[in-house]
């Protein structure tokens, strides 16, 4: 096989330059600005700033509201990741077993991924609206008075369902691709040996899906930390009584609504550090148990 080699050292950098420029302008520079502002105390109009060192970080870690947001984020992230990945795997297994109409079935399941997070949040807000929603009407007939505007547990259930529904399509595509990459001969051999469908799945199919599952676990955690802002903003706005005020929404609330730029920047730095730490732990400890 003939290989093409570029002799000049400048050409690779020129080819990489557009992407490096985009990364520097839209990622590295804003991140650097956030780190710098986290050590400052600025007025609401940005005319003056005072260096305060780690005061913003100490105030955040001592704040009961911030600790509540951290707890809410942990519950929200774990619930969304578990629900979306579990349902996606179930749907992918079902699609993999379909012979006729598999293409149409897959297309219908992929459509929700094209919906913007804010639109998904508004849609589920209407579905769960205590006045005009369909599901509260059904739940009321069953004896449960649904009201996510007043009840903390109802609000959390609403945002978890909306966020998980938005992510199911993405997970489904990867799980389905992983299932179709598994040789059918392995499952057929297990069936010949007398293994039932459930045993074949847990002893053959699921272990071979470990790389896909690990990748989706990392992606889903990052998704719940950042991309769910639109869902929270469109449904509950962090309420009631801070019940759904996850970390990314608290950054917006303190920075854009209360105009506390120093605290908001410090919170964004902590959030970025949390995501990096979680990703490192996942790659260091969980990946070791993944068989490729």
Image (tube, helix red, strand yellow):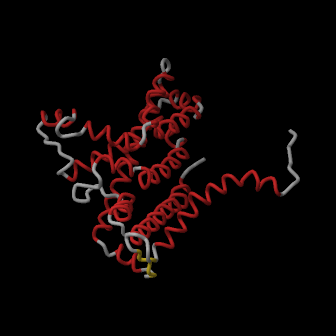
Point out residue 227 in the picture as x, y percentages from the top left corner. 44, 50
Residue at x-position 55% and y-position 55% = 287
Quadrant of the rendered structure where residue 32 is? bottom right
Q: Nearer the viewer, residue 90 or 14?
A: 14
Point out residue 228 in the picture as x, y percentages from the top left corner. 40, 50
Q: Nearer the viewer, residue 119 or 206?
A: 119
Q: Up-down: is 56 above or below 171?
A: below
132 horizontally vs 225: left or right: left
The quadrant in which the N terminus is found is: top right
Residue at x-position 17% and y-position 36% = 139
Residue 198 visible at all: no
Point out residue 219 in the picture as x, y percentages from the top left corner. 49, 50
Residue at x-position 57% and y-position 64% = 29
Q: How many marks?
A: 0
Q: Nearer the viewer, residue 53 or 192?
A: 53
Residue 191 visible at all: yes
Quadrant of the rendered structure where residue 250 is? bottom left
Q: Point out the residue furthest to the top here.
A: 100
Point out residue 179 in the picture as x, y percentages from the top left corner. 53, 34
Q: Up-down: is 7 above or below 54?
A: above
Q: Up-down: is 164 above or below 287?
A: above
50 horizontally vs 7: left or right: left
Q: Up-down: is 4 above or below 72?
A: above
């Amino acid at each position: 096989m003939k290989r093409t080699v570029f002799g000049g050292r400048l050409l690779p950098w020129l080819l990489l330059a557009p992407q490096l420029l985009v990364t520097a302008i839209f990622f590295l520079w804003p991140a650097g600005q956030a780190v710098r502002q986290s050590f400052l105390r600025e007025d609401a109009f940005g005319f003056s700033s005072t260096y305060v060192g780690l005061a913003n970080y100490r105030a955040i870690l001592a704040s009961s509201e911030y600790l509540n947001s951290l707890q809410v984020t942990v519950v929200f992230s774990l619930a969304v990741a578990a629900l979306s990945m579990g349902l996606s795997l179930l749907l992918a297994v079902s699609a993999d077993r379909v012979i006729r109409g598999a293409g149409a079935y897959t297309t219908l399941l992929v459509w929700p991924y094209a919906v913007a997070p804010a639109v998904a949040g508004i849609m589920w807000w209407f579905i769960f609206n205590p006045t005009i929603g369909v599901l509260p009407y059904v739940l009321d007939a069953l004896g449960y008075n649904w009201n996510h505007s007043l009840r903390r547990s109802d609000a959390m259930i609403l945002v978890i369902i909306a966020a998980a529904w938005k992510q199911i399509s993405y997970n489904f595509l990867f799980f389905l691709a992983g299932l179709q990459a598994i040789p059918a001969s392995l499952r057929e051999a297990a069936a010949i040996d007398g293994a039932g469908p459930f045993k074949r799945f847990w002893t053959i199919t699921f272990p071979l899906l470990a790389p896909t599952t690990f990748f989706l676990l990392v992606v889903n955690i990052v998704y719940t930390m950042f991309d769910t802002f639109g869902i929270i903003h469109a449904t509950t706005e962090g309420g009631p009584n801070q019940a759904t005020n996850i970390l990314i929404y608290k950054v917006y609330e303190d920075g854009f609504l209360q105009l506390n730029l120093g605290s908001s920047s410090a919170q964004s730095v902590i959030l970025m550090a949390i995501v990096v730490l979680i990703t490192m732990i996942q790659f260091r400890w969980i990946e070791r148990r993944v068989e490729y």
